[in-house]
Amino acid sequence: MFLKFSKHIILFIGILLVFTQISLAQKKDRRDRQKKESQESQEMGENFDPLEIDEEFLKNDSLPDIELELSEEEITLAQQEENQKKRKNKKKKKKIYFGIKTKGGLARQGNESNTVMEVFRYIEKENVIKDAYQQEIYYYDVKTRRVRSKDYQDFMAMVKKNNPIYLLHGRYEKYRDRNLREEGYFYKGTKHGKWLAYDSKEIVEEKIKYEFGHTRETKIIYYDNAETKIKEIIPMVHGRMQGIYYQFYENGVLAVRGEYQNNRKVNMWREWYETRQRMRDTMYPINWWEEKEPSLLRQWDTKGYMTFDIDRGGKQNR
């Protein structure tokens, strides 16, 4: 019996020795790893350059995840504040166009079955673009409550008379019976950027790009190579003559003014002498598709005497 007991004791001691050796080996391995990591950490601290951080470094698991614990009420309030800021900023941006603060206007005409409504932004009339060659300056007439247009000279005459008008500037939309028919932007009274025209089903039927009142295709011909003396302004839309045409003498005096539609002359064409004296008024068909010969309405000599007037039977005597 003593021998059996001795065998058990010897076996137990042997097992204990094995576990002790394993434990000591594990401790040694941990000490070696810690020493190695400490050395690597020290080397990294000495050689660390923040400019050398790349995306892979930022993607590793060493970056801590920070989570803020917010209640549902706090999250809702934060979202409401953010949305309110966005609405305010959006509202502010809508009021300012091309760096100029504007006001909103509305013009309505027609009846219940045929209503035309124009929504626009406007500024003071004194801010009109300085360009004597402008064909159309758009403005809001306070007396008639209509959006109208005139050429630069006529518009400036109204400004001098202090007529109650405002200059269109910024977003513009035109509706007919609640359907959008036209939209675009004005810059100091002139069409600028992309303008779209729609049919009754709000399908785009025409797109024209403008640059400060002139279509981007408009051709300007000069007398000189330095391009300081304008000879002709030829309005072009989609490769065809469309709009108000101007011709000038070399001294800058207007020689001819008329309108083109689809490459054909329409409406009133006027000519002047170099002295600014009126020379001739000629009437062309109102629409480009009409097959009518032009009609001479009035004519003057260089001294200003009328030599022809269709309303007075034609040729005139002094």
Image (tube, rainbow, N blue to C red):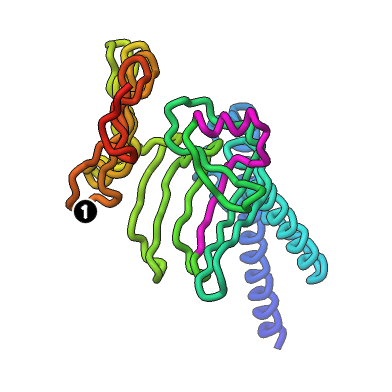
x 38%, y 43%: residue: 209
Q: Nearer the viewer, residue 209 or 50?
A: 209
Q: Give the image location of residue 72, x and y in percent.
A: 78, 71
**Magenta-highlighted residues:** 153-175
Res. 65 image quadrant:
bottom right
Q: Give the image location of residue 96, x and y in percent.
A: 64, 42
Q: Is residue 247 above or below residue 60?
A: above
| Residue found at the far bottom of this picture | 1
Q: Is residue 178 above or below residue 227?
A: below
Q: Can you identify the residue that label 1 sits on? A: 290
Q: Is residue 76 above or below residue 105?
A: below
x 48%, y 64%: residue: 180
Q: Nearer the viewer, residue 74 or 294?
A: 294
* Numbered disc total: 1
Q: Give the image location of residue 18, x and y in percent.
A: 62, 65
The quarter in which the N terminus is drawn is: bottom right
Res. 205 image quadrant:
bottom left
The quarter in which the C terminus is drawn is: top left
x 53%, y 32%: residue: 52
Residue 156 part of the magenta segment:
yes
Q: Give the image location of residue 30, x and y in percent.
A: 64, 51
Q: Is residue 186 above or below residue 44?
A: below
Local crowd size for mark 1, using a 10 Å CA cut-off: few (<14), some (14–19), many (≥20): few
Q: Is residue 47 visible from the viewing direction of this image? A: yes
Instruction: Report the amino acid beneath label 1.
Output: Glu
Q: Nearer the viewer, residue 277 or 93?
A: 277
Q: Is residue 218 visible from the viewing direction of this image? A: no
**Left or right, residue 291 beside residue 189:** left
| Residue found at the far front of this picture | 317
Element carrying mark 1: loop
